[in-house]
Image: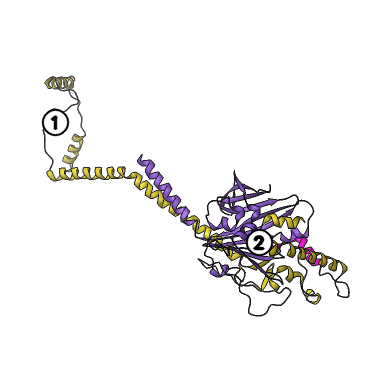
Chain colours: A yellow, B purple
Amino acid sequence: MQQEGKIFERLSNHETPPPPGLESRIMSAFENSRPATETPGELPGLEGLAEIVTDPPSAVTATILGNYFDHSTKQSFFRAHRWKFFAAASVIVVFILFYATSTQRQEKARLLAGDKKNPVIAPAEKTTTGLQADPLPTDTVVSGRIISGPATKNHRFSINGQYAALQQNEIWYSLLGQDDQQQGAWPSLPQKTTILLRIDEFTQVQLSPAMAAAINETRETKKNGKPSFRAKRTRRKLEKLKQREESFFRIQKNNNPLNPIQLSKFMDQ
Amino acid sequence: MKKGYWLSLVLVLSGCILHAQSNTGYLYISYRISVKENKKATLAAESYDGATKNIFISGDRARIRLVSLMRTQSLYYFTNDQNRQAVIVKESGKQKEQATLSADGWKKYNADFDGAACVIMKETVKILQYNCRKAVIMLKSGAQILVYYTDEITNSVFPAAEPMFGCIPGIVLKYVYTTKSTTTSYTAQQVSQDKIAEKVFELN
């Protein structure tokens, strides 16, 4: 049995070429048997298949037509109203931009107000003359705040963050109007930096270095503690200026310090 | 045609929204007064350098308040009161003063600005966040005031309470007056259209 298996294996690998000329004879016989109309490479009988017509199922036709008409309607509606869509979108974009800008603006204004805030309501305790270290209260920034600035009378002001009594509602008098004893309690004003005097939430006055120097001069004393000659001279000069200002802008004279022309007249004198 | 119609509608609507937001009936402006001496420094000029001018407007009333080293003075303006067009109150010092001006008195008080003409220039600048246009107020006396105004805010009481700006088509945020000796400029430091409390307009 094993020998039979080996024989079949040898036979399967055996190869014998055909007699010479047989292959060419077979191929010529095959070529002669094809019809003349048929082109090489084309399978016979396909022309007949092209003439066959078969209707698709009615459900498939309806679905395809429905889809076609729905799509067409949507596209034409968008095309017809595209400028309305554009207009609506533009209004929304403009509104959003404006809202964002106005919110930023309000926030900035609030921050500015918060930064410059100063207590409008006078302290319960009596303020004393001279500078006192008195920290500013923490600011509370409230949305939709109401401006209530100068209506409430303020009895103190701050010099670069330190509080002092505002006497007769006048900075000038508060800085220069005290008697000699009171003046001793006042430290010298810094001259190299700008001095900010805050009166209320909305009002701050800047003191120029030249004016700070003049005010400091009025506080100079001799060894015995009495005002120096220069202090007296400068004080006289400042008091004279104050009298001139009071006289020039007396209300009955119709001179208006809010009028830049009349203010310049006073300053140029 | 349709495109143009819808685009116009968008522009008109946007304009309406922006314009409506810029006029609340309230207006607060704080100006810083700066004085520069062109020649010799004088204490008189120094005493007003760094002062503050505040304008408060609510409805048909206005209050303009000046605070300087030597003086705190308010001007209350009432649009619809012919007998009491304005009240001037000197709030500071030993002697407090107060005067009431009728419509005629108010006119005399602002006689410097009678017949003033405005020349609007092309130049623009930005003050705070507002676009401002330059203009020159030509007074009858020959004096000129240089101003920068914005039309992004509107308020009808502003030019009435500030007759100096009667011919300016907007809210002035900076103005400068120059003489041979000094240049005085008023520059807005803060502008707000928040509500202002009634007590701000009460006479003290």
Task: Read off the residue under disc 1.
Answer: A50
Classify B140 as above or below A256. Answer: above
Chain of the residue that carries numbered disc 2 in the rendered image = B
Q: Nearer the viewer, residue B164 or A116?
A: B164
Left or right: A56 with respect to A118? left
Question: Please, what is the three-letter code of the amino acid marked with disc 2?
Answer: Thr
The answer to whether residue A242 is seen in the rendering is yes
Q: Which residue: 59% across, 54% down?
A: B128
Characterize the local packing of mark 2: few (<14), some (14-19) or many (20 or more) Cα atoms within 10 angstroms. Answer: many
Place of residue B41 in the rendered image (x, y in percent of width and height, measured from the top left)? 78, 56
Q: Residue A35: which quarter of the image?
A: top left
Characterize the local packing of mark 1: few (<14), some (14-19) or many (20 or more) Cα atoms within 10 angstroms. Answer: few
Q: Nearer the viewer, residue B14 or B99?
A: B99
**Mark nearer the viewer, 2 or 1:** 2
Task: Read off the residue under disc 2.
Answer: B52
Place of residue A261 in the rendered image (x, y in percent of width and height, measured from the top left)? 69, 54
Q: Nearer the viewer, residue A45 or A243?
A: A243
Q: Residue A226: which quarter of the image?
A: bottom right
Tag 1, which secondary structure?
Answer: helix
Q: What is the span of residues highlighted in magenta in the rendered image?
A: A204-225
Please tell me whether residue A215 belongs to the stretch shown in magenta. yes
Whether discs 2 and 1 lie on one chain: the answer is no
Tag 2, which secondary structure?
Answer: strand
Measured in 3D between alpha carbons, the distance from the residue under mark 2 to the one under mark 1, in whole angstroms, is 99 Å
